[in-house]
Amino acid sequence: MMVESATETIRTVSSNQNGVSSLTSQSEGGGREGGSNGDANGEISPVDLLHLQQQQVPVSMAMMTPQMITPQQMQQILSPPQLQALLQQQQALMLQQLQEYYKKQQEQLHLQLLSQQQQAGKQAKEQQQLGSKQLAFQQQLIQMQQLQQQHIINLQRQGLVGIQPSQVPIQSLQQAMCPTDLQQLWKDVAGVQNADEPIKHEGLDLSTNSSNTTSYTASKVSPQIPHHPLPNGQNSMHTPKRDRARLFEWISSFTKGESSDEHLTPYPKGTPLQSTHSSHEEHTASHPLYGHGECKWPGCEALCEDMGQFIKHLNSEHALDDRSTAQCRVQMQVVQQLEIQLAKESERLQAMMTHLHMRPSEPKPFNQPLNLASSASLLKRDSEPFPEGLPHPPTSAAAPITPLRQGPSVISSSSLHGVGPIRRRNSDKYCTPIASELAQNCEFYKNADVRPPFTYASLIRHAILESPERQLTLNEIYNWFTRMFAYFRRNTATWKNAVRHNLSLHKCFVRVENVKGAVWTVDEVEYQKRRPPKMTGSPTLVKNMISGLGFGSLNASYQAALAESSLSLLNSPTLINNNTGASLNMLHIGHDDVSSTVEQVNSNGSCSPGLSPQQYGHQIHVKEEPAELEEDSRPVSLIASVTQNLSMPSDERDMEEELPTEELE
DNA sequence: CTATAGGTAAACAATT
DNA sequence: AAATTGTTTACCTATA
């Protein structure tokens, strides 16, 4: 045993050196960000816009990261189940954003086609298109998406691979992408850009020579670029030719992969980009960058009473200058990253569906809603610590995206933020029961330098219960930790101390003198006791909570189940909630109370198959057959029940609402 | 605001 | 004697 553990430790330690300095103490977590930020900033060439563009997102993200999130919060978000849900939510958000983007592109395309066709006299085609507008839109959307995904893949293979260092922040960006984030990002970008402005702005004049080119390139890139001529037809852009040419080049490089010509057509003069199909009437009343009385330019939020004022503001504040173009670039990157992320996630989703033997066509109606719902609820919970208006922490969610492959490298860097005391009570609650969670993410935890979302007590207990004899020496517990979690292959002093501390502190851990020494066992009764009695034996409380949340028949079944089997059935929803991201918000409340039960139940052997095989090669002997044994088998079939239950929750409505969005993909 | 749970650090004793 | 193991206290943070 000792030898094995020793070699294990050595191996893991050496494999853990990703060039990332090992974290020696939690208190150092906060200060570490500064260094990386400095690096990122140091790369920026204030003179070269292209370089600047490449750096802006990472820089801004790096800027926001340390202040916005504490290690604990980061780590909480890092917990795979949450990450999963978060990912799903973000995926939904991205989908929305992308959809908007595509929609705008489509509108633009449509308008362009219309004008083109009118000029060309292709009436028949136009009629066709008008007749089947909806269908055509969707088809084109799909085509565009395919093209863009190809483009994205190309980017991944070519350019993005080389940008690895900045990938983490960018991914963080995508992960945390939400309107608020974007706003904040833009503010940051604006700030960065402002810092450079003194240098770059000085020579600007009002040359309008290439306004045509610029406006068209810009508008082709992003509908959000406000290159609207002034009412009198004059353009207010003022950027040196040189810069414009460069901008054009740059933009072209980004858009060449797209279904080209459609976007290349300049916008009909005086026809702003809009979100409505009816092109001409509303353009005076609506503008993609104008809404709710304020300018929607990223990071602006200037109040404009009416459209005229807004146009004025747009032309004065967001003219074609370095700052605007830089912001445009960032926006493009954002979109690109979202696209990339979308492609990845879609691919992943397909793989998951395939793996789960679900028809690829079904997942959307089925999964998406749940994802959204769950993410909504999860976001709600997770975002609480963050003041409104502030961006959500760019969760290092990047890691979980492709846990096993990217995990270690990506995570290790991202997890630098989350060294602190992460696994708080809530982690214990919100995350799946340790057993199933571990079973599912076993490989992930083994390879990824992420802190497991469990308390020490939970882990210790699990380790002990997983052992053949249900008892472990301290050293064996250590070994289990290091074997199962990459995270515990460092900071040994810290967590080992914590383990000892927990063993001593919690009554549920019983030290038994043995021939060879002392071993630790688990007193399940005590373990259960240590959980908040809030809900223990009070299904009515849960009932109230559930009903209070306005759940319908589903809740009734849950209530029944609760009353009937005293929480045991609640476990499945809990699992569902955590693992699949189903959004049974209700369970968030009572969840923790249940989790202990679930945890115990599950770890009584059901999960062990997922854990033990590779690690130990021995089967878990379930000693506690009586009450729990029957439950043990449940988690296995849980997935099935989960999937069943998932489709019915009250979030179904959300499901359907979101469906259209998803279907567009 | 308070109580509780959990994480970390540390001092110290007992054991190996 | 040094390392390990075990106990205890204190402090901090997050949460309910």
Image (tube, coloured by chain):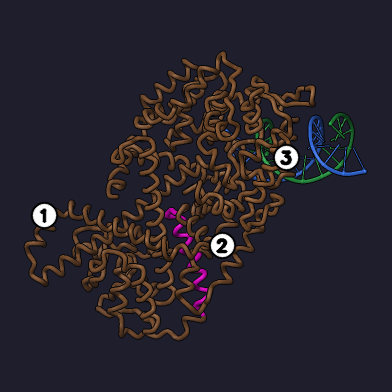
Chain colours: A brown, B green, C blue
Q: Which chain letter goes with mark 3?
A: A
Q: Secondary structure at mark 1?
A: helix
Q: Label 2: few (<14), some or many (≥20) within 10 Å?
A: many
User: First in sequence: mark 1 or mark 3?
Assistant: 1
Q: CA distance from mark 1 to mark 3?
A: 70 Å
Residue A442's place in the image compared with A321, above or below, is above
User: First in sequence: mark 1 or mark 2?
Assistant: 2
Query: Is residue A25 toward the left or the right of residue A111 in the image?
Result: right
Q: CA distance from mark 2 to mark 3?
A: 34 Å
Disc 2 vs disc 3: Cβ atoms closer than 8 Å? no
Q: Nearer the viewer, residue A555 or A159?
A: A159
What residue lies at 74% left-to-right and 32% top-to-bottom?
A474
Are the residues under badges 2 and 3 in a single subunit?
yes
Where is residue A203 shown, x and y percent of the image?
45, 86
Where is residue A35 shown, x and y percent of the image?
64, 63
Q: Which residue bears the numbered disc 2?
A: A63
Residue A338's place in the image compared with A539, above or below, is below
Q: Which residue bears the numbered disc 1?
A: A131
The amino acid pointed to by label 1 is: Gly
What residue lies at 71% left-to-right and 36% top-to-bottom?
A499
Q: Label 1: few (<14), some or many (≥20) within 10 Å?
A: few
Q: Secondary structure at mark 2?
A: helix
Q: Nearer the viewer, residue A565 or A539?
A: A565
Where is residue A427 shown, x and y percent of the image?
57, 38
Disc 1 vs disc 2: Cβ atoms closer than 8 Å? no
Are the residues under badges 1 and 2 in a single subunit?
yes
Q: Which residue bears the numbered disc 3?
A: A496
Start-end of magenta stretch: A177-198
Q: Secondary structure at mark 3?
A: helix
- Can residue A365 be seen in the rendering of this structure? no
User: First in sequence: mark 2 or mark 3?
Assistant: 2
